[in-house]
Image (tube, rainbow, N blue to C red):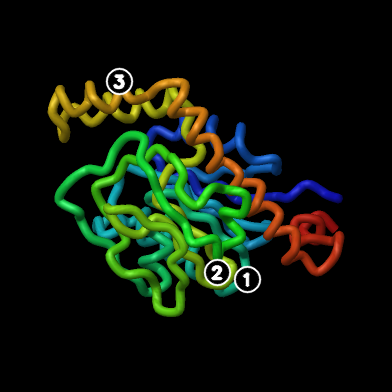
Amino acid sequence: MSRLRIALLNAAHDGADTRRNFRRELDADLVEFHCPSGDLPETFQFDACIVTGSRASVYWDEPWIQELKTYVGDAIEAGLPMLGVCYGHQLLADVLGGSVEDMGEYEIGYRSVEHDGESSLLTGVDEEFTVFTTHSDRVAEAPPGATVFARNGYGIHGFQKGDTFAVQFHPEYDMETAETVTKSKDDQLSEERIRQVVDGITTDNYEAACEAKTLFDNFLGYVRTQQPSEGSTAAAADD
C-alpha cells in the first residue's frame, strides 16, 4: 500500500512546534505549506488536507486567512478529506457555513471531553477522555448538516460533515509544546492562571491525553477507504 500524501496547511505563525508535532504523529508523507506567509498548494493533488492550530482568529480581516478559506472550500468541493485542529476546526466550521465566536475567556490546560461514539475519528477512544486545550474562540454553531460528536462545558469539540472532520482540542501536542504555548499567554492570562496550567502539565496527564492521538490513525484509515484503488491522487500526480 502506498504512503498517503497529505497537505499540512500550517496556520501557526511560528510553525516549528506545529511541524514537529504533526510529523511525529502522522504516518504519511506531509507536504507543508506555511499559510501566514501566503504559502498554499497550487493543486488538489493530495490524498487529504490538515489545517492546524494558530494564534489567529478566523474572523480576522487578513489576506492569508481569506486565501486559506478559499483554498479549503475549493479542496472540499474537489473531494479532499479534511482534518481541522483547533483553529483548523474553527476555520472548517466557518467555510462550511457554521459560526465562530470569541468566548470571552480561555479554555486552557488538560481537560475532559466526551464523545458519543458516532464518529469513526474517535473509534477506540473512551467516551470521556483527556485532552490538552488552548483557545479563546469556539464554534458557536456547527455547519448545517454537520454531526457534532464531541463536547464539553466550553462547547463543541468535534464535528463531521461528509469527508470533513474537525476537533477543537490538540491531540498532537507534546508536553514541551503545551508548556511553551501556555507560557506565551502571559499577555492574556494572569501569572497565577499560567502557573496552575503549567503545574498540570504532568506525565500522568500527558499519557492520559495520548489516547486521543488514535484519531490520527483513524483519519488516515478513513482517507484510505476513500481511495478508488491503489492509484491514489498522489500516485496519479506522479504519472
Residue type, label 3: Asp
Numbered label attached to residue 199: 3
Instruction: State which quadrant residue 135 falls in.
Output: top left
Q: Residue at coordinates 44% horizontally, 34% vertically from top-left?
A: 15
Q: Which mark is residue 115?
A: none
The quadrant in which residue 96 appears is bottom left
> What mark, if any, has residue 79 been given in the picture?
1
Q: Residues within 10 Å of mark 1 (few under 14, many from 20)?
A: some
The image position of residue 235, as x and y in percent, is: 81, 56
* Helix, strand or loop for disc 3: helix
The image shows residue 182, relative to residue 89, as above or below, that is above
- Mark 1 lies on a secondary structure that is loop
Residue on which disc 2 sits: 76
Q: Is residue 28 left or right of residue 110?
A: right
- Nearer to me, 46 or 193: 193
Identify which residue, 100 or 33, lies in the foreground. 100
Query: Does residue 194 appear to the left or right of 68 in the view shown?
Result: left
Asked if labels 2 and 1 touch by Cβ distance under 8 angstroms, the answer is yes
Q: In front of the other: label 1 or label 3?
A: 3
Q: Residue at x 64, y 43 (%)?
A: 30
CA separation in Å, label 2 and label 3? 40 Å
Viewer-side residue, 69 vs 209: 209
74 left or right of 182? right
| Image position of 191 with respect to 226: above or below | above
Which residue is located at x 48 percent, y 69 percent?
73
**CB atoms at circles 1 and 3 under 8 Å apart?**
no
Label located before the other in sequence (2 or 3): 2
Which of marks 3 and 1 precedes in the sequence? 1
Q: Position of residue 112 (x, y in %)?
A: 38, 44
